[in-house]
Amino acid sequence: AHISGRAKRRINFYQGQGAIFEHYGIQKQIDNAFYRQVWMPCGGYIVIDQTEALVSIDVNTGRNKGHKDVDKLLLETNLEAAAEVARQLRLRNMGGLIVVDFIDMKHRRDQQAVYKLMLEHLKRDKAKTQVLPISQFGLMEMTRQRLNESLGTTLYEDCPYCKGHGQVKTPLTMSVELQRRLVSVLGRAKEDQKSLIVVVHPEVMNRLKTEDGEHLVDLERKYQARLTFRSDPAFHREQIMLANATTGEEIRP
């Protein structure tokens, strides 16, 4: 492959024994690029969340609480955050609307210092950016040109388990949903259809056994039903299956 003379001066042949990415800390940088929380040398940290509408970045003091001068502490944390935000935007290749929630600063001069430092660091960015000064609410709004897909979109896809929500229902919630569904099914079932097999995730089963057993016994008495519970580790946490104990036919909602 052809390599320009200018590029050749910047290329060195790696002769080490270990993996080159590990030797130069590149793999660690890649791994860190997917953490929501990024720690800074001062002890503060930023939290990065990407949504369909925008990228939100929250700045926190974290462990940086040793200063007697609170104003100096906040300024120091926000200045480090401005530099780190600019770096993370390049590293993660994030584009579109970006909102940074800096820690509130009393003095306008401190806000200006953070704003100027952000502009300075964004000069290194190949993507075009537009930045507004920090608002009265402590927010800095900016836009960054989209250059291809972000690093996260390129290397990751939505979790098939939670469908990209990042959350699943608690065992308590699933227990309540199961009880409602049993009331619905048993309330309209004929006398010979009230013997049911109930299959749930093991964590939901544990909740039923330890916390909600009395409620289920009450349901059996009320509807003169017989419920047989089974757990299946292959089930999704939010999956419930009811089946007729006699025929084995699944009862759908």
Image: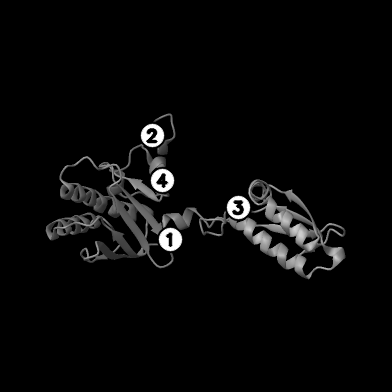
Q: Is residue 247 above or below residue 202?
A: below
Q: Residues within 10 Å of mark 3 (few under 14, many from 20)?
A: some
User: Disc 4 and disc 2: Cα gap in Å?
Assistant: 13 Å
Q: Please name the residue that numbered disc 1 is placed on.
A: 149
Foreground tag (1 vs 3):
3
Q: What secondary structure is found at the residue carrying circle 2?
A: helix
Q: Please name the residue that numbered disc 4 is placed on.
A: 30
Q: Please name the residue that numbered disc 2 is placed on.
A: 23
The numbered dot on residue 101 is none
The numbered dot on residue 171 is 3
Identify which amino acid the numbered label 4 is placed on.
Ile
Upstream in sequence: badge 2 or badge 1: 2
Q: Residues within 10 Å of mark 1 (few under 14, many from 20)?
A: few
Upstream in sequence: badge 4 or badge 3: 4
**Residue 251 shows in this picture:** yes
User: Disc 4 and disc 3: Cα gap in Å?
Assistant: 35 Å
Q: What secondary structure is found at the residue carrying circle 1?
A: loop
In the picture as drawn, the residue positioned furthest to the top comes out as 17
Quick one: 240 or 139, which is closer to the camera?
240
Q: Would residue 26 appear left or right of 141 to someone viewing this image?
A: right
User: Where residue 151 sits in the image (x, y, percent)?
Assistant: 42, 54
Q: Residue at x 76, y 62 (%)?
A: 222
User: Disc 1 and disc 3: Cα gap in Å?
Assistant: 37 Å
Q: Residue at x 78, y 63 (%)?
A: 223
Q: What secondary structure is found at the residue carrying circle 4?
A: helix
User: Where residue 119 sits in the image (x, y, percent)?
Assistant: 20, 59
User: Disc 2 and disc 3: Cα gap in Å?
Assistant: 44 Å
Q: Residue at x 62, y 57 (%)?
A: 174
